[in-house]
Amino acid sequence: MSHHQHRAEAPAQVRFGILTASDTRGEAEDGSGQYLKAQVAAAGHALASYAVVRDEPEAIRAALAAAAAAGAEVVVVNGGTGVAARDRTYEAVSGLLEKRLDGFGELFRMLSFAEIGSAAMLSRAVAGTWDGHVLFSIPGSRAAVELAWTRLIAPEAGHLLRELRKDAASPGR
């Protein structure tokens, strides 16, 4: 089956969870989270959950569990993927992933390199599957969020969910 056929069989509507990890932003200052919420709605998807939490592994994991409990199928975490001492989102998220999608981080950094040059290597964007969900973790800057959404997440979220459901429906795969 071709990639185009897989996409055609993907769910048209996905339930998203949006999580902003930040020690400095609240909902009022969360331009990246607001952008993602607007894009989810514009694409005809459903917003299952939205939260802004401190960049603390325990808070991030609790917010992810809350997103899953609210019905999110795909969760996008933005913020905390850099290398500063307070950037701990990568550790919180990557430790949960059951199947990593290494190509996501590689492609994100490649696309970022075209826009910002060698500083793209500082991003620890990561994605994979987690407890029956698709999980993306991306930098929190508005430009990075727009890049990840338009070039990688929006085009493939449904396809990824289709593939994940296929595995769940076929024990022993």
Image (cartoon, rainbow, N blue to C red):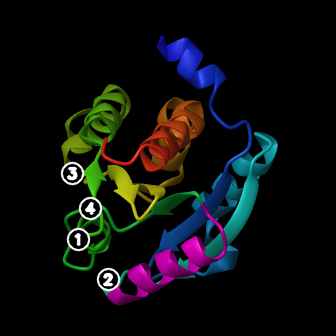
Q: Is residue 52 left or right of residue 170?
A: right
What amino acid is found at the position of numbered circle 2 in the picture?
A: Pro
* Closer mark to the observer between disc 3 and disc 1: 1
Label 3: how many Cα within 10 Å (few below 14, some 14–19, many 20+): few
For the residue labelled by badge 4, is the local secondary structure a helix, a strand or a loop?
loop
Which residue lies under the disc numbered 3?
122
* Closer mark to the observer between disc 1 and disc 4: 1
What amino acid is found at the position of numbered circle 3 in the picture?
A: Leu
Which residue lies under the disc numbered 2?
57
In this view, the residue in front, 40 or 74, is: 74
Magenta stretch, residue numbers: 58-72
In the rendered structure, does residue 82 fall within the stretch colored magenta? no
Q: Earlier in the sequence, mark 3 or mark 1?
A: 1
Above or below — where is 123 with respect to 5?
Answer: below
Q: CA distance from mark 4 to mark 2?
A: 14 Å
- The secondary structure making up most of the magenta span is helix
* Closer mark to the observer between disc 2 and disc 3: 2
Which residue lies under the disc numbered 1?
91
Q: Earlier in the sequence, mark 2 or mark 3?
A: 2
Q: Earlier in the sequence, mark 1 or mark 4?
A: 4
Q: Label 4 near label 1: C-beta < 8 Å?
A: no
Q: Position of residue 17 (x, y in %)?
A: 60, 64
Q: Label 2 near label 4: C-beta < 8 Å?
A: no
Residue 144 seen in this snapshot: yes
Above or below — where is 61 with respect to 2?
Answer: below
Q: Which disc is residue 163 wearing?
A: none
Quick one: quadrant of the C terminus?
top left
Q: Earlier in the sequence, mark 2 or mark 1?
A: 2
Q: Position of residue 141 (x, y in %)?
A: 47, 55
Residue at 79% across, 50% down = 41
Which residue lies under the disc numbered 4?
82
* Closer mark to the observer between disc 4 and disc 2: 2
